[in-house]
Structure formats: C-alpha cells, structure tokens
C-alpha cells in the first residue's frame, strides 16, 4: 500500500535546478567550493591554507544540504549573531499612575460623519435637487402639492380651497351605508343562542342501576378473629437479623410452627388505641425492620399471610434498643369434604350414556 506524498509549502516554492537541488542550494555549494579554491590557490603555508580550504568546502556543503531541526544552517548563523549583538540587560522603571478619582471625566468622543456621509448630506441639501422633481410635474399636480404644503405649514390660500371641498363630500354616502350594517347583526344573535341551550340540556343523560343487589354476594367465612394476644418472644434461635442500633426500632423474623421461613407476610404495627402506625412485609429470609423509630408506648403486631394463622404479638417501647422479635404462626390445612354435587352429576350423565 503506497503512502501519500508529503505536502510541501507551495507559498515559498523554489525551482529545481539539478535533481532535488534548488538554485539557492547550488549557489551555496558553489560559493563554498569557490572560496576553498581561492584558499587553495593562494600562496600560503600548508598549515594555514589547508584548514581554510577544508572549512570553506564543508561550510558550503552544510549550508546547502545540512538543516538542523528543520531549519537551514544559515538561519542558525543569523540567529546566533543577532542574539550576540542584541541587548541583554533591561532596566525597569516604575511609573506612578495618578488615581482616577482626582482626574476629570474624559470627554465623550463625538462621532464625526465620514466623507461619504457628508457628500450625501450636501447632495440632499443642495437647492437644485429640491426643484428638479417638481419641474417635470403638470400644473394640476403643482397646485395639489402646493395645497398640501400650505396645510402642513398652516397657511392655506383662499383661491385653492375649492379644489379640496368636493373631496370630503364623497365619503358621506359611504357613512350612510355603514350605518345600516349593524342593524342586522342583533337580529341573528338571539336566534342562534336558544338552539345551543336546548341542545346542551338534551345531552344530559341520567342513568340508574337498580339491578345491583347485596343479596347476590356470597359471604365467605374465613375464621374467627384472634382477640387474644401473646407477649413478644425475643429469641436468637430463629436466626433474626442483626439487632438494631437505634432505640425503638423493631426488627424480627416470621416463621411457622416448624421454624420454616415465611416470605411475603404482611405485618401491621398498631398502637394502644388500635391505630396502625407501621406496615411491614417479610423478605425472602422472613426478616422485617422499621426504618424510623417508634414513639414510647405499647404496640401490637398483627400478621397476615395466605393459608397461615398468626397470634398478635404485643411489646412495649421504652426508649431502649428492642431485641429481635419472633413472629410465629401455623399453617391452616383445608379439608376437602364430599358434597351432594357428585351424585347429581352422575345421575345427569346416566341418561346421556343411555
């Protein structure tokens, strides 16, 4: 895969003379060799002549083909001499600036119009430009514009007023026709309003549902409520969560009679008046915890779970850390008893088989 050509600086393009050598490089190389040839042909001692010959030839080659850090050698030489003869010592002199509070406010510069704007103003202010458009007008048009100028300046000539009198007489019949238009509007408005009111009254349906009766609901008796309560059991055998670190925070675990974990049990903490203050639910390991602490007093935990029966647990919060509470329940086994529906179904099927 071929690489792209390196972009070159086209702004300072130099023509190639021989191969990749430019005209500038050729003169630098030729100048170095010419100086070396002059030293070689000079009648000097060999110890003095040969060093100058070698240095001149090498310098010419270096100026032409040996750039340093992408800069030609001639720029390095010029920068060297410029740095030597440039001043290297600078003196700092503090200039005291007077505070602005003791100085007068600077004058606001007034924008002077430019020469182009001045030329436009002079062109518009010249008297010849004002009379040129009116020269091409007819006599009637000149009179009309003269009346307008007289009205604007408050000086109306009596000879030209009759030309203005017939103009306001024309809009009089227009005003009479406009007076008859609003007389038909109040006739149509009251005719439309009663129809809208009647339609709104007809769209008010009244439906009754007398078919709903409470006798059709079959009552389902689940069981008698457990009125008796038991004291809270603080046990470690049920593997409860870690004890709380704040007082009056309730934690515990819900298990059945066989010490099996009950998940998803809904618990309600009620105060001494029977009002619910917290609602909890056991997690996958049967743990439950209240986030905010309870107030001091006596409380009762009422637990509900499908196919389970729990006895309410009572405890008292006295501003101290409450140990983990064990909520224990028992599973309700539903007995399936035979009903009279079975023989009726068999009797109904006997004629079908015959």
Image: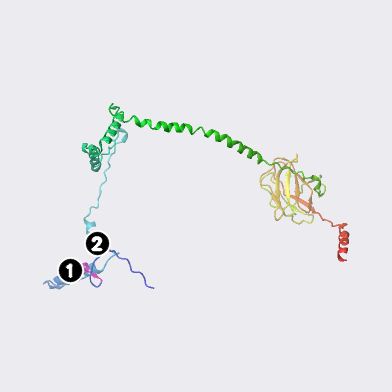
Task: State left or right for residue 283 relative to residue 309.
Answer: left
User: Badge 2 is on which residue?
Assistant: 75
Q: What is the number of the mark on residue 186?
A: none
Q: Where is residue 270? Give x, y as percent.
A: 74, 43
Q: Where is residue 286? Give x, y as percent.
A: 72, 54
- State yes or no: residue 23 in magenta: yes
Q: Circle 2 sits in a helix, a strand or a loop, which is it? A: helix
Q: Nearer the viewer, residue 170 or 308?
A: 170
Q: Are marks 1 and 2 in contact (CB under 8 Å)?
A: no
Against 234, residue 95 (above or below) is above
Q: Where is residue 153? Give x, y as percent.
A: 29, 29
For label 2, count other residues whose C-alpha is less than 10 Å away and answer few (under 14), some (14-19) or many (20+): few
For label 1, count other residues whose C-alpha is less than 10 Å away and answer few (under 14), some (14-19) or many (20+): some
Q: Circle 1 sits in a helix, a strand or a loop, which is it? A: helix
The residue at the far top in this view is 158
Task: State left or right for residue 301 relative to residue 129.
Answer: right
Q: Where is residue 208? Give x, y as percent.
A: 73, 42
Q: Earlier in the sequence, mark 1 or mark 2?
A: 1
Image quadrant assignment for residue 17: bottom left
The C terminus, quarter of image: bottom right
Against 158, residue 8 (above or below) is below
The residue at the far left in this view is 43
Q: Which residues are magenta?
A: 20-26
Q: Give the Cα separation between the discs numbered 1 and 2.
A: 17 Å
Which colour scheme appears in the figure? rainbow
User: Badge 1 is on which residue?
Assistant: 31
């Amino acid at each position: 895969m071929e690489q792209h050509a390196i972009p070159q600086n086209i702004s300072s393009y130099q023509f190639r003379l021989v191969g990749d050598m430019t005209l500038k490089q050729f003169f630098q190389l030729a100048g170095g060799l010419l100086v070396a040839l002059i030293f070689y042909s000079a009648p000097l001692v060999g110890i003095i002549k040969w060093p100058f010959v070698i240095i001149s030839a090498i310098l010419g080659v270096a100026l032409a083909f040996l750039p340093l850090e992408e800069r030609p050698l001639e720029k390095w030489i010029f920068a060297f001499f410029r740095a030597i003869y440039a001043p290297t010592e600078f003196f700092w002199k503090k200039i005291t600036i007077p505070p602005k509070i003791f100085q007068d406010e600077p004058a606001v510069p007034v924008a002077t119009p430019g020469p182009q704007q001045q030329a436009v103003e002079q062109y518009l202010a010249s008297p010849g430009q004002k009379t040129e458009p009116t020269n091409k007008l007819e006599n009637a048009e000149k009179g009309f514009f003269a009346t307008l100028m007289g009205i604007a300046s408050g000086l109306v000539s009596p000879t030209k007023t009759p030309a203005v009198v017939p103009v306001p007489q024309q809009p009089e019949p227009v005003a009479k026709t406009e007076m008859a238009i609003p007389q038909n509007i109040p006739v149509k408005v009251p005719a439309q309003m009663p129809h809208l009111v009647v339609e709104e009254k007809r769209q008010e349906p009244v439906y009754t549902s007398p078919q709903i009766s409470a006798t059709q609901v079959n009552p389902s008796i689940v069981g008698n409520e457990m009125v008796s309560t038991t004291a809270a059991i603080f046990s470690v055998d049920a593997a409860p969560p870690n004890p709380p670190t704040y007082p009056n925070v309730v934690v515990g675990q819900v298990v059945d009679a066989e010490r099996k974990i009950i998940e998803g049990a809904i618990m309600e903490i009620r105060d001494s008046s029977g009002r619910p203050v917290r609602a909890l639910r056991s997690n996958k390991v049967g743990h439950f915890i209240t986030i905010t602490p309870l107030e001091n007093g006596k409380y009762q935990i009422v637990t509900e779970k499908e196919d389970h029966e729990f006895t309410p647990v009572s405890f008292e919060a006295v501003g101290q850390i409450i140990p983990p509470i064990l909520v224990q329940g028992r599973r309700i086994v539903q007995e399936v008893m035979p009903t009279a529906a079975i023989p009726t179904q068999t009797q109904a099927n006997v004629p079908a088989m015959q």
